[in-house]
Image (cartoon, helix red, strand yellow):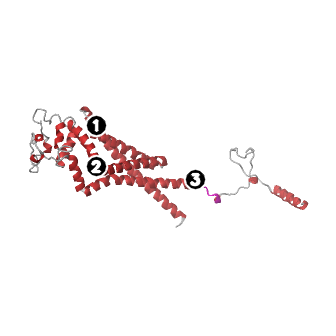
Amino acid sequence: MTKESDGKDSVVYYYCIKFALSAYSTLFSIIGLVILCIGIYAEVERQKHRTLEGIFLAPAVLLLLLGITMFAVSFIGMVGSLRDNRTLLKMFFWVLLVIFIMEMLLIFIEIIFEQQMNAVFHSNIQEGIRHYYDDLDFKNILDFVQEKFSCCGGDEYTDWTVNQYHSCNSSGALACGVPYTCCIKKVPGEVVNTLCGYKTLEKERLQLVDIIHVRGCIHALGLWFKDNFEVTFGIVCSLLLPQVLGLVMAWLYWQQLDDIYSRQDTVDFRGLEVIDFKTVDFTGAGWCLCFPREGGYIPVNVTDDDEDDEVAMSQSKSMKG
């Protein structure tokens, strides 16, 4: 393969990886910006009825953090790829790599320290249950999870005793009961009685197997992910593979730019012409021959008479010798 074809292939590869990384970064910048806007709207709405301080219990805060991170990292990659800025590309690569490693560590920690992580989730869910009727975001999420995964509470149904309305020490129709989303639907699509969980916290588990779901949502979610391994694997891949793709493209483009810059900085000394300094007028160059001169240094006009004189002088010197 000739040098010309090698150069063409190099240019094609350069533009392919450049625009692929630019499109990738632009797409995720837009996605991050959309998530950020949704998070801002949700946080503004949440602030109107704010009662919780925990970040885990505030989906709007999680959306804000996710949107800011996605937009900032992707924007750095987009500008770096468009401007061929190696510093920004390296920053994009290393930040994305750190995020990827942290996600992998969280997955391994969840697998290895399952009991400890469940305890952390349980304490946060209990805090959410305590303010169940005050935070509509958490209420909607927990209601959906309880209905979707046929569960009740965090660790088990008795977690609802921490809520002031469902505690057995309180008065009212909800006292010593659980929300209707914990109730078992005997017929699909039937209208559930909102007081179907009345006085269930006073009874034993075996007495409630046909009335409410006694299993906690933490265990229900864990079993669902284990039983549906293909879905779990697909979710994990959908989260990690785009990041791996970004890392690979950033690395390849980074290496391509390094190769281009190294070729531009390399001097082929074999192609340099050897200059005869006697033929150049260095007037004004100084003793170091390094002072600049407007218009550059010009060759000395050597006439035929001067050449004859030089030949005669060289012959006379040889005869004397």
Q: In this view, does 5 lie above or below 38?
A: below
Q: Residue beneath label 3, please?
A: 265
From the viewer's perspective, is the residue at label 3 or at label 1 nearer? 1
- The Cα atoms of the two marked residues, 2 and 1, are separated by 22 Å
Three-letter amino acid code at disc 1? Gly
Q: Does the magenta stretch include residue 268?
A: yes
Which residue does the numbered mark 2 point to in the structure image? 114
- Of residues 193 and 122, the one drawn nearer to the viewer in this rendering: 122
**Residue depicted at x 25% and y 57%:** 229
Residue type pointed to by label 2? Glu
Q: Which residue lies furthest to the bottom in this view?
A: 1
Disc 2/disc 3 C-alpha distance (Å): 54 Å
Residue 85 visible: no
Q: Is mark 3 on a helix, strand or loop?
A: helix
The magenta-colored residue range is 265-270
The correct choice, above or below, for 139 with respect to 223 in the image is: above
Left or right of residue 261, residue 165 in this image:
left
Q: How crowded is mark 1: few (under 14 residues within 10 Å), some or many (20 or more)?
A: few
Q: Mark 2 vs mark 3: give the one in front.
A: 2
The residue that appears at 54% across and 53% down in the rendered structure is 261
Q: Is mark 1 on a helix, strand or loop?
A: loop
Label 2 neighbour load within 10 Å: few <14, some 14-19, many 20+? few
The answer to whether mark 3 and mark 1 are in CB contact below 8 A is no
Q: Is residue 238 magenta?
A: no
The secondary structure type at the circle numbered 2 is helix
User: Is 114 above or below relative to 161?
Assistant: below
